[in-house]
Image (tube, rainbow, N blue to C red):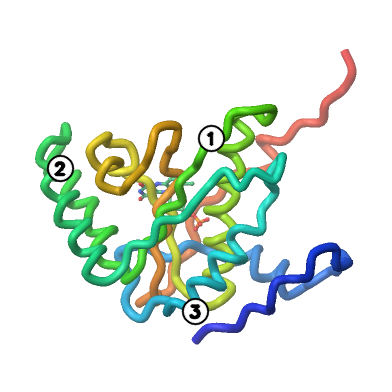
Amino acid sequence: MTGSVPPAPAFGEPLPIEASSEVVAFLARRRSASAMALTAPGPDDAQLADLLRVAARVPDHGKLAPWRFVILRGPAKDVFAERITALADQQDNPVKAKAALRKLTRPPIAVAVISRFIPGEIPEWEQRQSASAVCLQMLLAAAALGWGANWITDWYAYDPRALELLGVEAGEQVSGFLYLGTAAEPPQERVRPDVAAITTHWTPA
Ligand SMILES: Cc1cc2nc3c(=O)[nH]c(=O)nc-3n(C[C@H](O)[C@H](O)[C@H](O)COP(=O)(O)O)c2cc1C
């Protein structure tokens, strides 16, 4: 079901820019899988380690790696979900909040991408953007390896008690929960923006 990931290039190794019609075709048709349709199996430990290595190969101003991963799987994920469920009752819409948790409980694996902020020269905005790039890269790499994946935030990415349960520290934010597994059904194409309508050419005044 999954492909293999080549080893990391050596530091300083030339990495020529090479056209790949296969990658372009993949990007032109790729879709997230519904989190509700993600079932076992998910990536094993070695496959997940490869996936995270590829996900971490993103633009990162200042080479700060302003992000980290928290893996939720197996019985630990069940306990996390149980404790989060207890918090759903205190949300504005407990029924909706509880229903949303099925996206957490169904898939075999969740990777929380935690955005960190390292004070210094690099603006916080840029560090947060790099964390988002990690989420997208993981989504792309997972699909390229044959896994279904979905990037979700939902209320438990913002609720202070949920964040405490997850181990999110001061200055950190959840960029997303990346749900991974086997897509039980193929996703269908969704509405896409009219890119021409949101594209302009800057002209001097
Ligand atoms: C930062 C972020 C947070 C998201 N949070 C949710 C969410 O909480 N619930 C949801 O149903 N979709 C959420 N989505 C949207 C899903 O990822 C959705 O599956 C995705 O937009 C599908 O687009 P794609 O098929 O082009 O990948 C979120 C997307 C992003 C970028």
| Residue found 52% across the figure and 63% down from its top | 31
- The residue nearer to you, when weighing 165 against 100, is 165
Up-down relation of residue 59 to residue 197 (above or below)? below
Quadrant of the rendered structure where residue 161 is? Answer: top left
Question: Which residue is labeled 3 in the image?
Answer: 46
Q: Is 134 on the left or on the right of 182, as rendered?
A: right
Q: Is 45 on the left or on the right of 51, as rendered?
A: left
* Residue 77, horizontal then vertical, whole percent: 26, 63
Question: Which residue is labeled 2 in the image?
Answer: 87
Dot 3: few (<14), some (14–19), or many (≥20) neighbours within 10 Å? few
Up-down relation of residue 159 to residue 133 (above or below)? above
Q: Of marks 3 and 2, which one's residue comes earlier in the chain?
A: 3
Q: Are marks 3 and 2 in contact (CB under 8 Å)?
A: no
Give the Cα distance between marks 3 and 2.
33 Å
Would residue 10 be visible to someone looking at this image? yes
* Residue 85, horizontal then vertical, whole percent: 15, 50
Up-down relation of residue 58 to residue 6 (above or below)? above
| Residue found 10% across the figure and 41% down from its top | 89
> Under tag 2, what secondary structure?
helix
Dot 1: few (<14), some (14–19), or many (≥20) neighbours within 10 Å? many
Q: Nearer the viewer, mark 3 or mark 2?
A: 3
Give the Cα distance between marks 2 and 1.
27 Å
> Residue flagged by tag 1: what amino acid is it?
Phe
> Under tag 1, what secondary structure?
loop
* Residue 199, horizontal then vertical, whole percent: 72, 35
Within 8 Å: ligand 1 and the Cβ of disc 1? no
* Residue 49, horizontal then vertical, whole percent: 52, 71
